[in-house]
Each structure stands twice: as structure tokens, then as C-alpha cells.
Image (cartoon, helix red, strand yellow):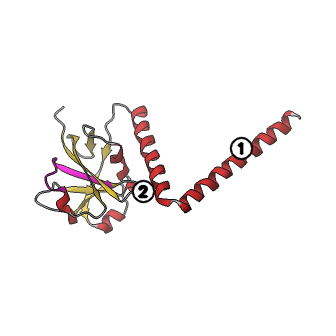
Amino acid sequence: MSSRSRSSVARAIGCVVVVAAGIGLLACTWMLPTETERVLGTAKVALQTAAQELIAPDQLPRITLGAEGGTRELDACTGEFTEMITYRDAAVPPLYAAHNNCGGDIILGWQLGTRVQVAGSDTVYEVVDERRTPKGAPVDTLAGIDGELLVQTCFYGEDQMRFLALAPSPA
């Protein structure tokens, strides 16, 4: 077999593998959409976190806090965290939310002690508390959470929300 023939066979095999992978992903998405969302979302967050550490290890993650609003403002998907007026409560710090697929997933890679910046502020914040609740849980499930402000997004492929409390970092 000539090198040209081997090259053609190799390309054909490569095309078959790519098409098969695409069909497999499509089948998983169709038959197991929630599980597929969870796996792909988790992989996306891991890649984003690793890229941040590799490309700019000394740069803190940064979020932008946007205007106040409700579901309509949240669904606008601006990349900013909307201050959720439906979660206003004297026992809960101001709460800012973003959909995971609209930039909110940045917080899924954060842990207690993670230091972050808020655009437009010189203050460095630190994650000091966390709560996980079912989607749509009432605001009173957040009563007593520490911090100056809260950021929230949903986990990929789960019926769970993640709330992280941020406070000015002592360091």
C-alpha cells in the first residue's frame, strides 16, 4: 500500500471516529440530558479553573455585579450578577445571581478561602461561607449566612443552587 493510500485510510478512520463521537454525544444529550449537562458543565468549570491558574496564576477571579432586578433581568444573560430583589431579607446579605451558562459558573470552581475581585471595587473579597439549596428554596434557608454579600448560580444538571458568601479578605 502506498503512503498516499495509507494517508487516505487514516483520514477516513479519523472522520469516522469524529462522526461516531458526535453521534454518541448527541445520543447522550437526547437520552440523558441532565447527566450530560452535569458532566459537560463540570468539565467546563474544571477547564476554566485550570486555564485561569495556568494563564494568569497571580490574577484573582473577577465578577461584575449588575443592577437589581428579578427573573427578567437574570434571564437577560449579560454576564453580570443581578441583585435579586426577591431574596431581600434583613437576615440575608445582598444576593447577586447569574445563570451558570451566563457567566455564573465561575463561582462553581471557588472554595472556602478563595480570594476574588468585584469589578469596580478595590476590595479583595474572600469566600467565607457556602450554602446549597434546592432550586427555588425560600430566602429564609439563607438566614444566618456570613458575609457582606452573596453570589449564586445553579449547578449544571442538578436541581441545586450554590450560594457563596463573600467578605473583605483580611490578607
Left or right, residue 93 beside residue 109: left
- At horizontal 32% and vertical 42% (from top left) the residue drawn is 110
Q: Which residues are magenta?
A: 142-153
90 lies above or below 18:
below
Residue 131: which numbered mark, if any? none
Where is residue 36? Give x, y as percent: 50, 55
Task: Name the residue nearer the viewer: 77 or 29.
Answer: 29
Crowding at label 2, few (<14), some or many (≥20) Cα neighbours within 10 Å? some
Among all residues in the image, which is located at the extreme bottom? 72
Left or right, residue 5 beside residue 107: right
Instruction: Give amino acid for label 1.
Output: Gly
Quarter that holds the N terminus: top right
Q: Return the residue at label 1.
A: 14
Quadrant of the image occupied by residue 83:
bottom left
Instruction: Classify mark 1: helix, strand or loop.
Output: helix
Instruction: Classify mark 2: helix, strand or loop.
Output: loop
Left or right, residue 40 beside residue 16: left
Quarter that holds the C terminus: top left
Quadrant of the image occupied by residue 28:
bottom right
- At horizontal 13% and vertical 52% (from top left) the residue drawn is 144
Residue 157: which numbered mark, if any? 2
